[in-house]
Amino acid sequence: MGDVPRVLSLLLAVGLLGSIGCSAQQRIGGHRVPRLWVQQHGGVVEGPELARAQRVASVFAEAEPAIDVRVLDSNLMGAFSWAPGDVYLTRRLVGALDDDELAAAIAHELAHLVQDGHLDMGPRTLVTPVVAEPEARADRLGRRLLEQHGVAPEVMVEMLASVSAGVQRQPATVAALARRMKALRSPPAP
Ligand SMILES: [Zn+2]
């Protein structure tokens, strides 16, 4: 069917095994996220979690094409982005974050899509931070997106801290998140 996602970046391979995952994925051709992938990640939930996620995401309404945010019925801590503008957040992640932190998680995913050339967030995002590591780059651009949309940029670090608190039993994940928080607090490499 040609629906196999191409994983562009994956924070941690353990993402699908019980920890946090963040991956930017691209379907080759077409614009719909494969139903099988959604099913494998628990299917989508509606109701208050979806309403809240979509309300928070509405701050990024000028994205072109329009973004679509969904909540996966998954007890893992994770976020995923699909070209051109689909963002999937797990139910557990949504439950672990406050509204600003949720905006930070969405901004991080949108940053992946902008950096991969799928999404246009306007001329304000043309300057891409020079950071080698994909997750750190998305954190930095996501932080800029937050600032441009009236959300305190420090929330990006707070979001990562909240995620870390939720995955304390996974030392490798905690260490990776700590590196990202440290990178956000340091100036970018030249
Ligand atoms: Zn990411």
Image: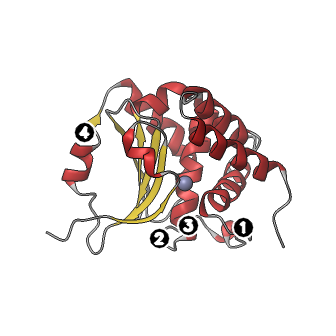
Marks 1 & 4, CB-CB < 8 Å contact = no
Given the image, on which type of amino acid does mark 3 rest?
Val
Pointer 3: what residue? 114
Who comes first in sequence, dot 4 or dot 2?
A: 4
On the image, the x and y values in percent for residue 189 come to: 82, 68
Residue 151: tell me if it is visible: no
Q: Is label 4 in contact with label 2 (beta carbons under 8 Å)?
A: no
Secondary-structure class at tag 1: loop
| Quarter of image, res 130 | bottom right
**Looking at the image, residue 93 lies above or below residue 23:** above
The residue beneath circle 4 is 43
- Name the residue type under label 1: Val
Mark 4 to mark 3: distance in Å? Answer: 26 Å
In this image, 60 relative to 125: left or right?
left
Separation (CA) of disc 2 from disc 1: 19 Å
Q: Which of marks 1 and 4 is in front?
A: 1
Which of the pair 63/53 is nearer the observer? 53
From the image, state whether disc 4 or disc 3 is nearer to you.
4
The residue under the point 64% across, 36% down is 159
